[in-house]
Image: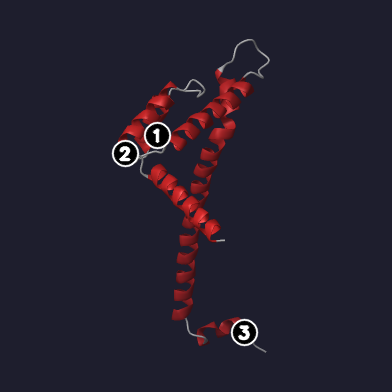
Amino acid sequence: MAEDVKEEKRNETEDTEEVLDDEAPEDEDVKETDEQLEEDESLPFPMATVVRQVKKRTHSKMISSKVKVAMNEFLGDVVGSVATEMGKTRYSMVEMDDFQRATKPYTYARELEKEKERVVAELEGMKQDLESLIREFQRKFALAGVDDLSVLKKSG
């Protein structure tokens, strides 16, 4: 029983060390990993190109090697999907309209976001107009006394 507890603690310590190694790798390990990734022929794109594009938009943050590989593979999947869709053209040449049709699923979300922003802005404008009309309506009836509206009552 005591041996099981010792073994379990030893395993936890090893797991913790592995996590610490993953979180804060030494400079030499990072350089070796990056060099290995750059030379990896199984990835669809040169790793340096993908990393450069990611770093442009992540404001000089460190990027784990797993993220670099996953991004590269994801981009390869996107290119494969778009190329397969473009290949469905009935013509012998792939034209720009084939490209636009194939990329529509990826650009549609951006278009929806723009449409959402436009509709929300329009609704906000309508809301402000309605609030203004309500204030004007309440102001007019606040000025008029109840007796002033007696003409509306039918004389009987």
Residue flagged by tag 1: what amino acid is it? Val
Residue matched to label 1? 54
Mark toward the start of the polypeptide (1 vs 3)? 1
Relative depth, front residue between 68 and 60: 68
Residue at image location 51% in from the left, 84% down from the top: 148
Look at the numbered discs 3 and 2 and tell me whether their residues touch, using CB distance below 8 Å: no
- Image height of 151 relative to 71, above or below: below
Residue at image location 56% in from the left, 22% down from the top: 99
Residue flagged by tag 2: what amino acid is it? Ser
Disc number at residue 138?
none
Residue neighbourhood size for the residue with mark 2, other residues' Cα within 10 Å, grouped as few (<14), some (14–19), many (≥20): few
- State the separation of the CA atoms marked 1 and 3: 74 Å
Quadrant of the frame with the C terminus: bottom right
Which marked residue is nearer to the observer: mark 3 or mark 2?
2
Residue neighbourhood size for the residue with mark 3, other residues' Cα within 10 Å, grouped as few (<14), some (14–19), many (≥20): few
- Image height of 27 relative to 119, above or below: above
Look at the numbered discs 1 and 3 and tell me whether their residues touch, using CB distance below 8 Å: no
Residue at image location 59% in from the left, 21% down from the top: 83
Residue flagged by tag 3: what amino acid is it? Lys
Relative depth, front residue between 57 and 121: 57
Disc number at residue 153?
3
Mark toward the start of the polypeptide (2 vs 1)? 1
Counting from the top left corner in percent of width and height, residue 112 is at: 55, 42
Residue matched to label 2? 60
Which type of secondary structure does the marked residue at label 2 adopt? loop
